[in-house]
Amino acid sequence: MASRPTGSMSKTVEERDHVVIRFAGDSGDGMQLTGDRFTNATAILGNDLATLPDFPAEIRAPAGTVHGVSAFQIQFANNDVTTPGDHADVLVAMNPAALRADLDKVARGGTIIINEDSFTQRNLEKAGYASDPATDGTLDGYQIYPVPMTSITVRAVESLGVGKKEAERSKNMFALGLVSWMYGRPVDVTLRWLEKKFGGKPEIYEANVASFNAGYNFGETTELFAHQIHVAAAPVTEGIYRNVAGSQALAWGLIAASVRSGVPLFYASYPITPASDLLHELSKHKNFGVVTIQAEDEIAAANMALGAAFTGHLGVTGTSGPGIDLKAETIGLAVITELPMILVDVMRAGPSTGMPTKNEQGDLLHAMFGRHGESPIPIVAPSSPADCFSVALEAARVAIRYRTPVILLSDSFLQNSSEPWLLPDVDALPTIDPRFATPNGSDFLPYARDERLARPWAIPGTPGLEHRIGGLEREDRTGDISYEAENHERMTQIRREKVDGIAADIPPLEVDDPTGDAELLVLGWGSTAGTIRAAVQRVRGAGERVATAHLRWLNPMPTNTGEVVTKYRRVLIPELNSGQLTMLIRARFLADAKTFSKVQGLPIWADELEDAIVRMLHG
Amino acid sequence: MAEENGDVSGVATLTKKDFTSDQEPRWCPGCGDYAILAAVQGFMPELGIEPHNTVFISGIGCSGRFTYYMDTYGFHGIHGRAPAIATGVATANPDLHVWVVTGDGDALSIGGNHLIHALRRNVNIKILMFNNQIYGLTKGQYSPTSEEGKVTKSTPFGSVDHPFNPVALALGAEATFVARTVDNDRKHLTDVLRQATEHPGSAFVEIYQNCNVFNDGAFDLIRDKQQGLHNQIRLVDGEPIVFDEGTRCLAFALAHLSHGPTEPTCIGVFHEEDRSTYGEAVRSQLERAVERLGPGDLKTLLHGGDTWTVG
Ligand code: SF4
């Protein structure tokens, strides 16, 4: 075992409530890994946190260019953290391109740690700098710490017999060590992980440990850094925690739904950013009986999932924007055949290919109305990475109970970002009864209905329940094809009433209005929940009275939604689109709701929303 | 499943009636589809496959209605997607007998992608492609198997599209069973379908089907009793023309013997080979995962990785 840093605190310690750090470097610099490790150490220390990876759009952009910059942002605090932070207090820039790409994400007066060694003439040029920003005044007003990370790392691992390239590559561990010292992160967590990861390759392991220690010791012993910063643990509910990203939580929620219903999970999907991680994660868990198929295209994926649903599986297909367009016809088929199925849409920015790696909530109206004919479908949206778990379970419950496809609207922010998760008691998770049809001797009626208007789920292989379904309009009860005028109207109404009826089966919209006399309601949905909470906390801190509510089910909405949105004199709806929920709320409830809209592929920042709330209160 | 539950006496008593639904077929009088339906309903009881273990899946087109006339499980899907739906069904439950009924437009035009991928995966489905070389349901446009120069409503000056050779296409897609037969030769049709049923994996059967309304007589050279005598080249395994079903290149050559049913054309089984089926491969992977990782446990899954305890 390599020697550990002493960890003695010879320097002064400054207390802070919260800190935002951004690690940025070239794609090859290992910034995601660095961020991930820092996150784990932070979580184990007991801080609340939220993270956001920021990948470059190109897979292999030329090294050293702004396009090739990969970053990872984390906010951690001694209290409730709801977002990865508007602006970074600290930027670790591994090269000039990272500085150039991310300088505008650093708070004024913030700290910038640069890898001095990479600020060569050539790298500056590649990043598009005419002169060295570290010395030409560009960084005036920031606290700059130039650290020769590459050369110290190379020296630290010199004696270990690894090649120069490997040595240089471990400079991200130097950065991690340095920042770990600055914020007093536990060392053993990272060392244990290194041992697990590189235990089989002793040289690489030693090199990484040596670089990590070199970084840690550099912080402690050099005079560059005057003090350490301490962020106390956040007071949280007792229990066992882990850090979880939305894509994991969503996959595990689907698995949990399968376990708790006894219905095997069948996931078919076509690779697409940012939904592919769901396929990757689910395909690891075949020991749960999870069938995963990488289909030939988006349409096939949807149809395979639907075929599996017909056969008594929990059929799920996942995709993002362009894929949901392609699946629309199949969703219509699932609506008319009334089979349980889940469609996960991990929303991304823009029409067409748009900005695949950037975030947007642009598909709400598509999910609502994006099919020909009248084709109602339940829509549910998670509000945080960990919430993806319970939303997946919830989507499965409704799909199975009501024999209907359900659209789960996640987004790229939720999929990629992570947060600590208080692990649920798995035995206390709700069970789902699939109520498969069994023969009862009389003629089987595939479109007979129960009290929830759900039809029987009769799966092939069951003697006596042979029946035919399909995309043609059917007669109620018998399921025979029917073009009869009144029947079509009745079936249209039944399909709508069935979906509307789900409102009775979901909790009412909860309103957070501490003083009970707020004039303004901030209503949200999906991944903006954290930002809304942060902004409203600040506004309330300034003595304002503001209420909030967050919609989990977008269709149907909870039964009291109309009452809530018409009760407040003003309603503000922050959305990462041009006002799609606002349109639904206004149309449905004649409420005078206003949109706070942002469509830049970026999150809404808490401070801009704070301004908008204040303007609405006093404007 | 059929085999496991099968009480033999029950199987033995199955008749055509057990496979005939209460829906009245609604094809045009004289349509070749009737003969195919009768043949399928007629030979299924002999196989001892029970209706409840059988699923018919179809797409859009005249052939799509087939599903409604079989008293089995059935799924009438959307245009071109039947092989994808069937992949879901046959993979979710590899014990079922899954049939896809499709047409030349459905399978080769809008659904071409699903067809070739189902074939290469060797999904255990039997694909009956009714080739009438025309779009019937939409009232007479040329199809991807229509001959060049075909005059239809959408090609008043003649089609300039070169047609597919469906058998060659299936062979190229790595199909493990490829055959061609004709709608009006009950014996040949039944023989080919029986072999297709017995083949484990994807079976692609092109059936020359006469659309007497929009493309009457397209296959007369082959279908007609007298002309057929001269123009059918019957492929019989091991018999002259000395033929071996296991050789894909030979099958290719035979597929290309004619440019279409306008000259002497091969019918019969072109190619058959053994390859593990998709459903079985998926199932055995699930079983191996359980052997390797133990049966899935939700608590273990959630608590795997780094956790920490508060309080
Ligand atoms: S249009 Fe042609 S293929 Fe269709 S039912 Fe009529 S005869 Fe048969």
Image (tube, coloured by chain):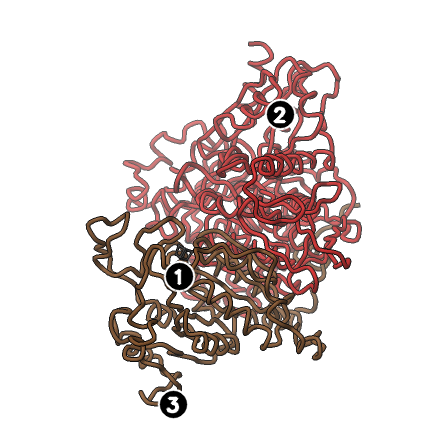
Chain colours: A red, B brown
Q: Is residue A543 visible?
A: no
Whether residues under marks 3 and 1 lie with C-beta atoms below 8 angstroms apart, the answer is no
Of residue A509 and residue A142, the one placed in the foreground of this image is: A509
Residue under label 1, please give it.
Answer: A165
Chain letter behind tag 3: B
Tell me the SS state at disc 1. Answer: helix
Q: Is residue A265 visible?
A: yes
Figure quadrant of residue A75: top right
Element under label 3? loop
Find out if the beta carbon at label 3 lies less than 8 Å from the nearest ligand 1 atom.
no
- Mark 1 lies within 8 Å of ligand 1 (Cβ measured): no
Query: Is the N terminus of chain A in the top left, top right, bottom left or bottom right quadrant?
Result: bottom right
Image spot of residue A91 (x, y percent) = 48, 38
Q: In the rendered view, does B295 fall on the left or right side of B172? A: right
What amino acid is labelled 1 in the image? Answer: Lys
**Residue B305 appears at what percent x and percent y?**
65, 57
How far apart in space, not on screen, are marks 2 and 1 (Cα)?
A: 52 Å
Residue that mark 3 sits on: B238
User: Compared to B116, does A592 lie above or below?
Assistant: above
> x and y percent of residue B129 in the render?
42, 64
- Chain where mark 1 sits: A
Amino acid type assigned to the residue bearing label 3 in the image: Gly
Which label number is shown at residue A523? 2
Quarter-of-image position of residue A309: bottom right
> Which residue occupies the foreground of this view, A117 or A372?
A372
